[in-house]
Amino acid sequence: MTNRITTRFNELEAYGRPGFVAYMMAGDGDSQALLNALPEAGADVIELGMPFTDPMADGPSIQASALRALDAGMTLKGVFDQAAKFREHDTDTPLVLMGYANPIHHMGFENFARQAEKAGVDGLICVDIPPEEDGELREALGQHGIALIRLATPTTDDKRLETVVENTSGFVYYVSTTGVTGAASGVAQEVGTAVSRVKTASGLPVVVGFGVRTPEQSAAIAAEADAVVVGSAIVDAMHEGGVAAATELVHTLSQAAHGAKK
């Protein structure tokens, strides 16, 4: 599948540098302003969180962010509206929705995929649908040119990895630590070994996240991966200091990632 995600990673490879992926929560604070500002701040790919009441893979920062967004009235339709507004002025930056199965299933897989395509979405990470159960969703997304991005973890053995990467598109998200988002960052050397294994199995770019908060961590992980993902730190910066603080953090972390030597 060729869409903005593939194009962006091909560009990064041609530039000879790792990428930076920024996660943010739709509806938490002035999220439209933050979304619009992320590419200029250094984000090569954006993950836009879809708020959900029970985000079981997420730590306290993103859990709180999701609840704030829901309290403010954010809905799945609102997420699509924000994506569409973003596309009015940015036609190149890949936009990946990240969230949970319940709201997607409630909307209906085909309707979700159709609305996502209309809004300019390029991919989906749905953290609580296993590969054995995502066939209907994957088919709907594929018909609308949207990548279904799966996750691998330190506990994913070689046999399971074959199942995880089969029919995965866009990239593989490698969770560098066991536990929830915002946990301690993985050891760079161990990440490098894991990235090589996942990349060999999938033939796709591998991005690494969970627990990256500092420029040093960003550079260390980026040096071993195709891109580094930061989420909880950006969410915290947004909550504590608004759009200015969040974009400054993205600028700092993305510069560190872009300057990493692979």
Image (spheres, rainbow, N blue to C red):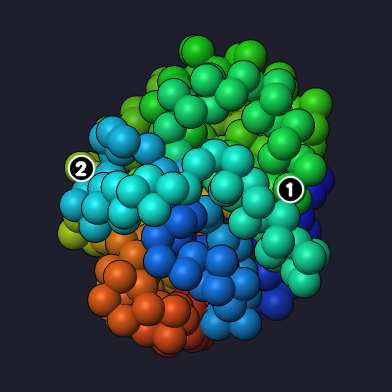
Find residue 116 and report its horizontal and vertical position in percent: 70, 40
Would residue 229 be seen by someone viewing this image from the given angle? no
**Screen quadrant of the N terminus:** top right
Find residue 231 and report its horizontal and vertical position in percent: 37, 61
Mark 2 — residue? 179
Would residue 42 be seen by someone viewing this image from the given angle? yes
Number of the label disc, if any, that sits on residue 119? 1
The residue at 34%/28% (across/down) is: 157
Report the number of discs.
2
Q: Of tags 2 and 1, which is closer to the observer?
A: 1
The residue under label 2 is which amino acid type? Gly
Q: Nearer the viewer, residue 244 or 38?
A: 244
In the displayed structure, does residue 221 sit left or right of residue 33? left
Number of the label disc, if any, that sits on residue 52? none
Where residue 234 sits, quadrant-wise, is bottom left
C-alpha span from label 2 to label 1? 32 Å
Q: Nearer the viewer, residue 193 or 257?
A: 257
Find residue 3 and report its horizontal and vertical position in percent: 79, 49
The 10 Å Cα crowd at callout 1, few under 14, some 14 to 19, many 20 or more, is many
The residue at 64%/21% (across/down) is: 109
The residue at 60%/41% (across/down) is: 77
- Where is 142 relative to 60, above or below? above
The residue under label 1 is which amino acid type? Ala
- Where is 177 relative to 34, above or below? above
